Amino acid sequence: MAIYDLTKTPADSYDTHTHLNDDKLFHDVPAYIGRAHEFRVMEMNIVGYDAQGNERALEIAQAYDNIYAVLGFQPEDTAEFDAAAAEKLEEQLQQQQVVGVGETGLDYYWDTVPRDVQVSAFKKHLALAKKYDLPVIIHNRDAFDDVYAILKESGVTKGVMHSFSGTPEQAMAFVELGMHISFSGVVTFKKAEDVRDAAKAVPLDRILVETDAPYLTPTPFRGRDNEPALVKYIVDSLAETLSLSATEVADATRKNAHRLFLNHE
Ligand code: NI
């Protein structure tokens, strides 16, 4: 199958969560950005996950227009998030082109790092988000109760539940805390009926789209590496789910991302 169908490309879209900083994609950044542009993915957030990922995210964001960096340590990498790493992160968050803190959160599925270490790193990220008035990108896997309680207690009301994969009730609990809900390729998976129901429950002005490339490749390309250009398959799937046009979904999610990350429409 041809990778892209230009005839179905909707309005410009904003991939709010992608990892061109990942080893799988970092070797060919200009090509991935060029391809994204060809398919009208004109803006993206390069999201950090560890020290090297954060360095690379900054490097890419500072080299290209309309590409931004979000910096943090994902739960699985919080073992290396010591005082020195926290200090360095705080310094990086104040640099040009940085629009958020993350990804951060809790992962009780892999459970590779003790939960108390994950929790303390998550709290530190939330405190930094608050201090610098930045939105936070949250990774939650099998940890809804703790993520919800810690987020609520932090007082942070600006951010994203990344690659949302819960129930409509869980989505709405986060929306009520002020969060946006970001949908990835998971929304295109046949079995993800719950996730599509969640998309129907969330107000359109709180929905974002993301690829999480190189992971979570949307249907019909599962099995190959994901890339930002494929965000249109998530837009298409949401459009079908919400009975809207792809252009309406691309426009709405792009504007939502502008408001949240760039402070304009
Ligand atoms: Ni990610």
Image (tube, rainbow, N blue to C red):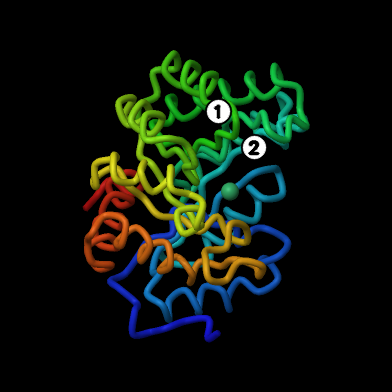
Residue hosting label 2: 73
Give the side of residue 127 with respect to residue 201, left or right: right
Q: Are marks 2 and 1 in contact (CB under 8 Å)?
A: yes
Looking at the picture, does residue 237 appear above or below residue 36? above
x and y percentages locating residue 156 in the rendered image: 40, 24
Residue at left offset 70%, top offset 71% = 27
* Quadrant occupied by the N terminus: bottom right
Residue 90: percent from left, percent from top: 57, 33
Front residue of this view, candidates 25 and 62: 25
Q: Where on the picture, by quarter, is residue 233?
A: bottom left
At label 2, counting other C-alpha atoms closer than 10 Å, the crowd grade (few under 14, some 14-19, many 20 or more) is many
Q: Secondary structure at mark 2?
A: loop
Residue 182, which numbered label?
Answer: none
Task: Determine whether, in the image, residue 159 is placed left or right of residue 259.
Answer: right
Please state which amino acid type lies under the numbered disc 1: His
Residue highlighted by disc 1: 125
